[in-house]
Amino acid sequence: MTALLVALTLGALTLAGALVFYVLRLTRHEKDRSAARVAALAHAIDAPASSGAAADGPGVALGPDPWEAAAPAALPSRGPMFGAEQPGVPVRAHWLMAAAGVLVLVLLVAGGLVLGTGSGAPAGTTATAPLELVALSHQRDGDDLRVSGTVRNPAAGAAVSGLAAVVYALDRHGAVIGTGRAPVDYPGLAAGGESPFSITVDDASAASRYRVSFRTQTGVLSHVDRRDPVIPSVEVRR
């Protein structure tokens, strides 16, 4: 899901960049066209005046020109006319820039929603409340160590499946000298349910203590010791 989101975001940014580049090219093209129109119009206005001056010739008096007084009033000055000519960004360029911004914004919002909904842990890996160890006992059978007890899934917990108990036998220096693992009697443990378990660790004659943990196929589940009273001769660690 994260890889797909990254790919979509990169694609959106690429598309937005392409739209911005196209808008810039379109704006420059419109400016060039506007400048060309202004130059062509200036040339068209200047051309008749030049040809008229050449045709009059020096020393020829034709009398007062009836258009001479009306010309200044009828024709606007060249400065204001060309000063008002401002090349602008086409309307479609504004729409393309707005579309690019909206596309990037939508993808960012969608990515945040996907990450927010996908941040939870997969079902069965963790519970809303830790498991509870409510009973534990052990006995030696020759060189073997047999550990049994009861685990409870609290009412606030999430249902788990494939639950197993694991025992680590330790010597007096804390080194692991043997392990044992077995499914609990009811591996599918619903909220509020309990299950007994029993595990044998072979060749554990040198064991001075042991640890108990619970896990599923996806990992270790946390648990708390709820025994009352706690047996002093047994050490249980999470």
Image (spheres, grey):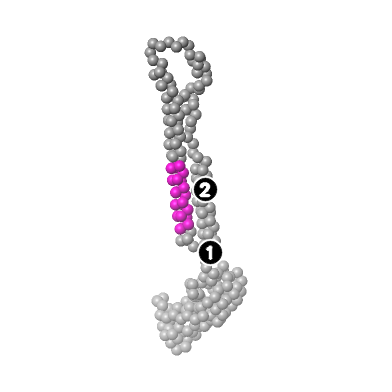
Identity of the residue furthest to the bottom in this view: 142
User: Dot 2 lies on which element?
Assistant: helix
- Rendered location of residue 108, percent (x, y): 51, 53
The residue sitting at 42% across, 19% down in the picture is 52
The residue sitting at 45% across, 34% down in the picture is 34
- Rendered location of residue 86, percent (x, y): 48, 32
- Rendered location of residue 183, percent (x, y): 51, 80
Q: Which residue in the structure is indicated by mark 1?
A: 120
Magenta stretch: dominant secondary structure: helix
Q: Which residues are magenta?
A: 6-26
Q: Which mark is residue 99?
A: 2
Residue 115 lies, with reference to residue 177, above or below; the image says above
- Along the line of sight, the residue nearer the viewer: 154 or 205: 154
Residue 21 within the segment the image draws in magenta = yes
User: Dot 1 lies on which element?
Assistant: loop
Q: Residues within 10 Å of mark 2 (few under 14, many from 20)?
A: some
Q: Earlier in the sequence, mark 1 or mark 2?
A: 2
The residue sitting at 53% across, 71% down in the picture is 124
The residue sitting at 46% across, 55% down in the picture is 11
Which picture quadrant has residue 133? bottom right
Q: Residues within 10 Å of mark 1 (few under 14, many from 20)?
A: few
| Mark 1 or 2, closer to the camera | 2
Which picture quadrant has residue 130? bottom right
Q: How far apart are the alpha carbons under marks 1 and 2? A: 33 Å
